[in-house]
Image (cartoon, grey):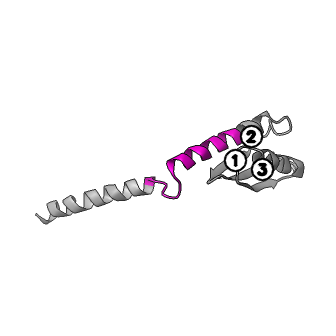
């Protein structure tokens, strides 16, 4: 009987915990969609820029309109250019440019 009662209580609690962990409580669904669109737009703009189109090592993440760039590029100019491109995308509140500059990408 105790095992059945434990299952009756523990399974729903475990399910609730799993569901709560999967929810992003800090952003509304609309904001999450906006952030996804911003990330896609920044990636698209980076891919079409002649100076940066061959660089695949730039990661883009967006939360509440704040774009974070990370990864590695070969020059300071490429890092600055990536930041400028991200800042000019509609909906971007600010850019955190955490890209590292390396002497070479090999």
Mark carried by residue 106: none
Q: Residues within 10 Å of mark 1 (few under 14, many from 20)?
A: some
Nearest the camera: 79 or 27?
A: 27
Q: Is residue 44 magenta?
A: no
Q: Disc 2 vs disc 3: Cβ atoms closer than 8 Å?
A: no
Q: Position of residue 64 (x, y in %)?
A: 61, 54
Q: Disc 2 vs disc 1: Cβ atoms closer than 8 Å?
A: no
Residue tagged 3: 72
Q: Is residue 25 left or right of residue 66?
A: left
- SS for dot 3: strand
User: Which badge, 2 or 3, is on the more N-terminal residue?
Assistant: 2
Identified at 78% across, 33% down, the residue is 48
Query: Which quarter of the rendering shows the N terminus?
Result: bottom left
Identified at 84% across, 46% down, the residue is 81
Nearest the camera: 93 or 97?
A: 93
Res. 97 image quadrant: bottom right
Q: Residues within 10 Å of mark 3 (few under 14, many from 20)?
A: many
Label 2, label 3: how far apart the Cα atoms are: 9 Å
Q: Which residues are magenta?
A: 22-42
Q: Residue furthest left?
A: 1
Viewer-nearest of labels 1 and 3?
1
Residue tagged 1: 59
Q: Is residue 67 left or right of residue 24?
A: right
User: Which badge, 1 or 3, is on the more N-terminal residue?
Assistant: 1
Label 2, label 1: how far apart the Cα atoms are: 8 Å
Identified at 79% across, 40% down, the residue is 55
- SS for dot 1: strand
Q: Is residue 30 left or right of residue 99?
A: left
Residue 45, above or below 10 = above
- SS for dot 2: loop
Residue tagged 2: 56
Label 1, label 3: how far apart the Cα atoms are: 9 Å
């Amino acid at each position: 009987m105790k095992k059945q009662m434990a299952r009756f209580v523990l399974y729903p609690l475990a399910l609730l915990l799993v569901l709560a962990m999967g929810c992003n409580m800090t952003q509304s669904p609309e904001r999450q969609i906006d952030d996804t669109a911003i990330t896609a737009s920044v990636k698209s703009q980076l891919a079409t820029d002649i100076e940066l189109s061959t660089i695949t090592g730039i990661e883009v993440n967006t939360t509440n309109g704040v774009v974070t760039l990370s990864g590695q590029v070969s020059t300071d100019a490429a890092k600055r250019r990536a930041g400028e491109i991200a800042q000019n995308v509609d909906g971007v509140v600010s850019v955190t440019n955490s890209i590292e500059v390396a002497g070479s990408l090999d």
